Amino acid sequence: MTLVLYFGEDHWNRHRSLLDCLKVPEELKPYVSDYKINVFEIAWLEPETVAKFKSDFRIVADYFVRMRRDKTYEPSRETIRHVHEVLQLMAELTKDRRFAEIQLPPGSAEGGTNMCEVIDRYLNKGRAEGREEGLAEGREKGLIDGIVTSLKNLIANTGMSPAQAMAALGIMESERDKYASLLTS
């Protein structure tokens, strides 16, 4: 029996039997066994069908159905029994390595967590950290831009040299080369 679990967002458009895959002359076809390829299009399953799964695969299938249908994923609160294995499978199927890199607290890999916790606590944590880093970089750039604007105004309005303007603003000696180059760019 040949079984294919297909996770693509588009319908399966490949061969569905052995004879479809091979170029067999008509006179030989009666002698060649034609094996059917059973394809299950996971992302195209009906929610009622997904609900019939009894294993953690229900969570994986639900993810693909929702992502295809809604283009977003509202995580399930259903307890995952084999957390590590589900996350490894999700990493491979989605090509999102963050699933594989999640470091779970002791004991949760044997069950006791759900996709809602995984997404919120572990995947969104990275987004929050990235957002904080972006904000910090933005604040620093804004501060630097403000200092450069102040330097340019001092130089233009008072006739000070760049070195005098930097001294007037209290810019440290170690930072002056950086600001001098920003004044000329």
Image (cartoon, grey):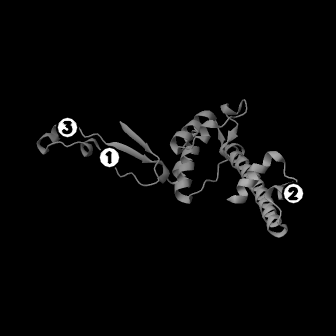
Q: Residue 86's quadrant in the figure? A: top right
Q: Label 1 crowding class (10 Å Cα cut-off): few <14, some 14-19, many 20+?
A: some
Residue under pointer 2 = 169
Q: Label 2 crowding class (10 Å Cα cut-off): few <14, some 14-19, many 20+?
A: few
Give residue 48's position: percent from left, percent from top: 54, 53
Residue 135 visible in the shown view: no
Q: Is residue 149 left or right of residue 35?
A: right
Upstream in sequence: badge 1 or badge 2: 1
Query: Residue flagged by tag 1: what amino acid is it?
Result: Arg
Label 1 SS: loop
Give residue 81's position: percent from left, percent from top: 63, 35
Upstream in sequence: badge 3 or badge 2: 3
Q: Label 3 crowding class (10 Å Cα cut-off): few <14, some 14-19, many 20+?
A: few
Q: Which mark is residue 32?
A: 3
**Residue shown at the point (72%, 44%) measured from the top left:** 121
Give residue 50's position: percent from left, percent from top: 54, 48
* Badge 3 vs badge 2, beta-carbon distance below 8 Å: no
Label 2 SS: helix
**Residue shown at the point (75%, 49%) measured from the top left:** 177
Q: Which mark is residue 16?
A: 1
* Real-space Cα separation, disc 3 to disc 1, in angstroms: 16 Å
Query: Residue flagged by tag 2: what amino acid is it?
Result: Leu
Q: Which mark is residue 72?
A: none
Q: Is residue 96 left or right of residue 175?
A: left
Q: Is residue 89 left or right of residue 76?
A: left
Give residue 44's position: percent from left, percent from top: 47, 53
**Residue shown at the point (39%, 39%) measured from the top left:** 3
Upstream in sequence: badge 3 or badge 1: 1
